[in-house]
Amino acid sequence: MVSFRDKLVHAPVAYTFRDVIIVPGFAEVEPSEVDLSTKVTKSFSIKVPIVSSPMDTVTEERMAITLARLGSLGVLHRNCSKERAIEMARNVKEASEVIDSVPTLSPNDSVARALELMREYDIDVLPVVDGDGRLLGTVIKVDVLLSLSEEPVASIVRRDIPILDTAADVSYAASLMRESKLTALPVVTKDGRYLGFIRAEMLSTREKGVEPSRGRDGRLLCAAAISPFDIDRARALDRYVDILVIDVAHFHNRNCINATKRLVKEVSADVVIGNIGTYKAAEDVVTGIERVDGLRVGISSGSICSTGEVTGAAAPTLFAVAEVADALKDYGLEIPVIADGGIRSAADAAKAFAVGAWCVMCGYLFAGCDESPSPVVRIGGKLYKYYRGMGSHAARVQRYILDRYSPVAKHVAEGIEALVPYRGPVSKVLREFVAALKAALGYAGAKSIRDMWEKARIAVITEQGAGEIRPHSVEPL
Ligand code: XMP
């Protein structure tokens, strides 16, 4: 047996994102030419390598639809009933690539109801329909705000708002929006039935050539989290989703591996396994389970995680990715590695790519977006959204998630509740993230994520040095 002193003296260093920098390398392409497309599982590609976490304050259908439309992916959470999980997956699969389903008003609905829906769906325009679903006209926010709450919307309905039909292409829709100065326009079928809305945000990305992520059925790519112990739910979801994501805090566990061995035989969707954090875990997973289509890697780096603090155990995402990627290399396996937890910026994502990640998973970055489930709150003049760990006490009392933290429920919370700054629409967050990521790859001298694995060099930085490479010595304005 190894001596205890040796165990201590020869312990590896578990480097984290904050400990390292990317060493600039010779660049043969400009940042604008960098290609960020990657695979999230063996069968499915995404153009934008950042996916959202399966957390109940991050990914429900609205987030999943938006991310898939923008070339990325949202993993639906599982802190809900099986029926609700199926409903979310169906909503993603039934969603159009550009048309949003916004609820309708009937002429007798009140102005107060219109305002409530506008806030909930973050839209300034709402459709008013008759009993047969035919569009009667549109209500806009300025009229709603300037009318009495109890008035019926019939009194403020506008019939002069442009309407799109299903054949309208992106540039025509954009030109109508510019002319009318409205950020969303209703779409109707040939016989005048209301279908949904097209929003300016979606058009601006489509105009720039952003391609949605699609499943084998040609519809928006859809992924959902599952427990390895709930085969019934996995089978039910398998009818709708392209990817099932095993959602366990510490997957390297005999019961989890045995259960997943059975599960992968029962489903046709790609199966992502996680979370794992070491070489040995990767080895045991790929040798023990017949089919592994992706790996979710990182333990306790998440912004709302308290696992490391509570238990002393952690595999920080940067360290974990390097371990797992090495195991896959040694076994000659091409299995996408999803770096999960602690990614605050494109800089962190670039570091994860440098040590073998294929894409990154974020909760924190998306929790503050319009498309996450919780409402915006104003505190001291600043806007926030509520975000919580799936192992937090509040998430655990919802019951469904208990098994994430063990096959038999653990009796300790491993996550916290928090507020994150409000960030606006996902489209904006992704745009900024992609621009910064392309710049990071440019500095590393890489033209793609795969290129990062080979070319990007990492250096360890001291705590003092970390201070020097941030703005310093000045009072920021
Ligand atoms: P970020 O840093 O993006 O991390 O907020 C999101 C990831 O954190 C994991 N997660 C948890 N880990 N306790 C944990 O130890 C928790 O309560 C918890 N909830 C989420 C998860 O991997 C997620 O993708």
Image: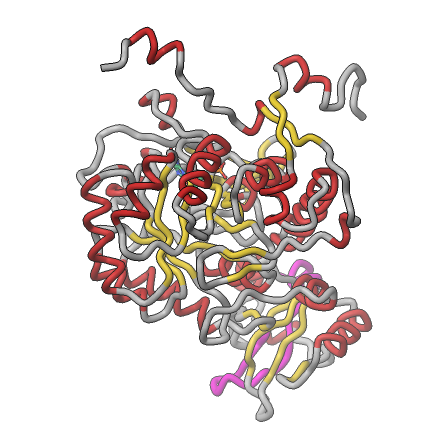
Span of residues in magenta: 127-148
Which residue is at a point 17% across and 39% down the rendered structure image? 408
Q: Position of residue 379 (x, y in %)?
A: 58, 33
Q: Where is residue 309 in the image (x, y as percent from the top left)?
A: 38, 21
Front one among 143 and 399: 399
Q: In which quarter of the image is residue 181?
A: bottom right
Q: Position of residue 257 (x, y in %)?
A: 23, 46
Left or right: residue 252 versus residue 14 is left
Q: Does the magenta stretch include residue 83?
A: no
Q: Is residue 394 visible?
A: no
Classify the position of ligand 1 by quadrant: top left, top right, bottom left or bottom right.
top left
Left or right: residue 189 versus residue 402 is right
Q: How is the image coloured?
A: secondary structure
Which residue is at a point 42% across and 51% down the rendered structure image? 333
Where does the N terminus fall, quadrant-wise? top left
Q: Quadrant of residue 134?
A: bottom right
Which residue is at a point 75% across and 23% down the rendered structure image? 471
Q: In which quarter of the image is residue 403?
A: top left
